[in-house]
Image (cartoon, grey):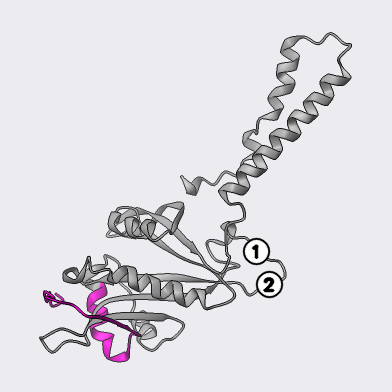
């Protein structure tokens, strides 16, 4: 188990994860997560091979371990096109090199929780992503039963955009996952709630105009009431007009 040092007055400092952190990083992941990672993953983290990372340490520790990791976050830069969130992003056709930052792992030693460390680590990732001009968003997956993580991301204004059925397979059992996203540098979904509302209102208005035009042309004809109602029903969006993504449910 990780040393559960009780901090009387912590002084948290954030730094990149280094090769000297390798052994402890593996132990922290083993203690905190039900998923086992390959040794190559840890080597890539500590050597910065396609993975960026930040570690949290407590400089006020009196046990001689002031440079020992007590929290960490790892992330990877990925191409937006071809990613598993490509369909919920707005793309500029002239810019094919748009990217995303995907958070791989995030953890804090139990005795250091509620110090705001996880929040600060996520902010480091957001800052990193914001400094990449072509980066549109930060995104991640959270297992469906991890309520504390879900609450954390919601509090930090991440948007839960999708539920993925049986995304994880742990110890012979399937678990759902929530997909969270945080837009940066003006990135956004193809249709924001405001845009959807605007499109819907415009659709209704056009429908009313079309119906009024038809009724005006038929003003001299005797049209049964039920026929008018049938015509009007076309003003409402049908299921064929909706974009249905079952994984959102």
Question: Dot 1: few (<14), some (14–19), or many (≥20) neighbours within 10 Å?
Answer: some
Label 2 element class:
loop
Position of the N terminus, as image quadrant, is bottom left
User: Magenta residues, as a range?
Assistant: 1-29
**Residue 172 image-quadrant placement:** bottom left
Which is nearer the eye, 231 or 115? 115
Q: Is residue 77 left or right of residue 47?
A: right
Question: What residue sits right under mark 2 in the picture?
Answer: 95
Height in image: 133 above or below 236?
Answer: below
Question: What residue sits right under mark 1 in the picture?
Answer: 91
**Residue 56 image-quadrant placement:** bottom left
Label 1 element class:
loop
Which is nearer the eye, 178 or 228? 228
Question: Dot 2: few (<14), some (14–19), or many (≥20) neighbours within 10 Å?
Answer: few
Residue 219 drawn at (x, y percent) = 86, 14
Residue at (34, 59) in percent of width and height: 169
Residue 189 drawn at (x, y percent) = 58, 57
Residues at discs 1 and 2 in contact (Cβ within 8 Å): yes
Q: Is residue 249 left or right of residue 67?
A: right
């Amino acid at each position: 188990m990780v040393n559960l040092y009780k901090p009387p007055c912590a002084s948290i400092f954030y730094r990149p994860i280094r090769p000297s952190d390798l052994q402890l990083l593996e132990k922290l992941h083993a203690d905190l997560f039900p998923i086992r990672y390959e040794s190559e993953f840890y080597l890539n983290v500590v050597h910065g091979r396609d993975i960026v990372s930040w570690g949290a340490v407590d400089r006020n520790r009196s046990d001689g371990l002031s440079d020992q990791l007590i929290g960490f976050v790892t992330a990877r830069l990925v191409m937006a096109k071809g990613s598993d969130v490509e369909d919920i992003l707005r793309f500029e056709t002239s810019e094919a090199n748009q990217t995303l930052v995907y958070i791989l792992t995030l953890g804090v030693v139990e005795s250091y929780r509620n110090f705001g460390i996880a929040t600060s680590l996520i902010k480091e990732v957001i800052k990193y992503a914001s400094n990449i001009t072509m980066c549109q968003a930060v995104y991640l997956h959270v297992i469906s039963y991890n309520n504390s993580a879900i609450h954390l991301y919601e509090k930090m204004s991440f948007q839960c955009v999708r539920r993925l059925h049986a995304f994880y397979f742990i110890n012979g059992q399937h678990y759902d996952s929530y997909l969270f996203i945080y837009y940066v540098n003006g990135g956004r979904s193809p249709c924001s709630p405001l845009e959807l509302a605007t499109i819907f209102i415009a659709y209704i208005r056009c429908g009313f105009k079309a119906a009024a035009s038809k009724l005006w042309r038929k003003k001299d004809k005797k049209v049964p009431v039920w026929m008018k109602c049938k015509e009007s029903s076309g003003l409402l969006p049908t299921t064929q007009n909706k974009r249905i993504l079952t994984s959102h449910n």
